[in-house]
Image (cartoon, grey):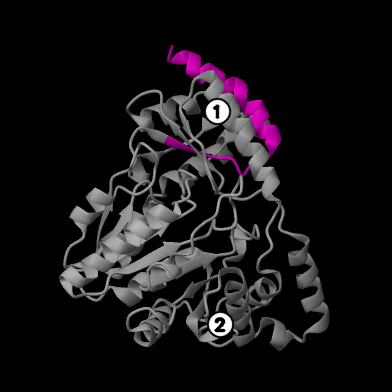
Amino acid sequence: MSVSKAMYELGSKRSVIRDLFEYGKKRAEVVGKDKVYDFSLGNPTVPAPECVNETIRDLTQTLDSISLHGYTSAQGDADTRQAMADYLNKTYQLGVNKDNFYMTCGAAASLTITLKAIVSSNQDEVLTVAPFFPEYAVFAANAGAKFSFVSPDYENFQINMAELESKINEHTRAIIINSPNNPSGVVYSLDTIKKLAALLEAKEKEYNSTIYLIADEPYREIVYDGVEVPYATKYYKDTVVCYSFSKSLSLPGERIGYILVPDEATDSKELYAAVCGAGRSLGYVCAPSLMQKVVAKCIGQTGDINMYLENRNLLYDNLTKMGYSCVKPDGAFYLFVKALEDDADAFAEKAKAHDLLVVSANSFGCPGYVRISYCVDKDMIERSLPAFEALKKEYE
């Protein structure tokens, strides 16, 4: 083979989620779009807040082409980075400044750059906590690190601290957490974050090395019932935040986010320089100029979270009444459902026979569960309920 075998394998086989999404499009051509119940992608259907459209209109009418579409600084527009700092300082009392931020093409770029900046040898290890977004393994491999994960805490889907403690070793360079979590929708509690911080501080002293906590936070603002998401940098100094506006502002296709490297992090100046170097190495310099200006004006706003809440309640209430066992989400827009057999892949295939497209969580490190994305039209959820009922009866 005259090309990279590893890249060929990645490119010739889609992720489970994308493969299911493509199947749904083909199936819709056969039976009709209204008869396919596609819960595969986390692709928000809630419209972006009006601020987004208003800002785009204003910018295109008031700025010249170079100001609007030209290159920004490699790490991002200074005014945009200052807007990020001002918002976080006001909201979470952080004390950060514009030079702590690196603007990126969404959360995937943020994570890829951060891991590339941290990992320095093929002996380095990256840990995460199941259930987790499957692409973490791809991003870690791209950085040259070994990847492993802590098994799920099936009781409450917080962090299995005992197992995490046993897996951290002298080669551990970073731990990725995701809260609100994709795929469970669970928010890590303040108690969990404090225990995690204490554990990592102890391990840093034990091994006399830095262990960075990477907080992947694209769902931070999408929470329900007054639940708060602890800001990890306030409890563990060696935290790097990877953020995306894809979910909060319903802009998944615009690919805009940032990396936050706080001053209190160990070797923060060197780490920030390494982030800049990794961005350069990967070709991720100068995030989209127009979108940088848009998020600077709209930071702190969200799409209509109540629409997600209505969908959550509709789906959760009906599926639990049918007899499904579901994790009640505190945030994000996924319902994590226990499959009706041990093999979640087989269950997801049987669901396809009812034109229900749900994602097996085997690739999320959580066998026996499926993810149902409810950032969809409410009408589709209502139309899908008889199919869920039929699937349940099939197992009876």
Does residue 23 appear to the left or right of 245 in the view shown? left
Q: Secondary structure at mark 2?
A: loop
The residue under label 2 is which amino acid type? Gly
Residue kind at label 1, given as amino acid type: Asp
- SS at circle 1: loop
Number of marks in the rendered image = 2
- The answer to if 379 sits in the magenta stretch is yes
The residue sitting at 40% across, 53% down in the picture is 191
Q: Which residue is mark 2?
A: 76
Quadrant in which residue 141 is drawn: bottom left
On screen, residue 232 versus residue 90, left or right, reads left
Assess whether residue 298 is covered by the magenta stretch: no
Mark 1 Cα-neighbour bin, 10 Å: few <14, some 14–19, many ≥20? many
Q: Position of residue 207 (x, y in %)?
A: 16, 71
Tell me where residue 112 appears, x and y as whole percent.
Answer: 40, 68
265 shown above or below 244? below
Q: Residue at image x 61%, y 20%?
A: 386
At 67% from the left and 49% from the top, the residue drawn is 305
Predominant SS of the magenta segment: helix
Residue, disc 1: 355
Q: Which residues are magenta?
A: 370-396
Residue 141 in view (yes/no):
no
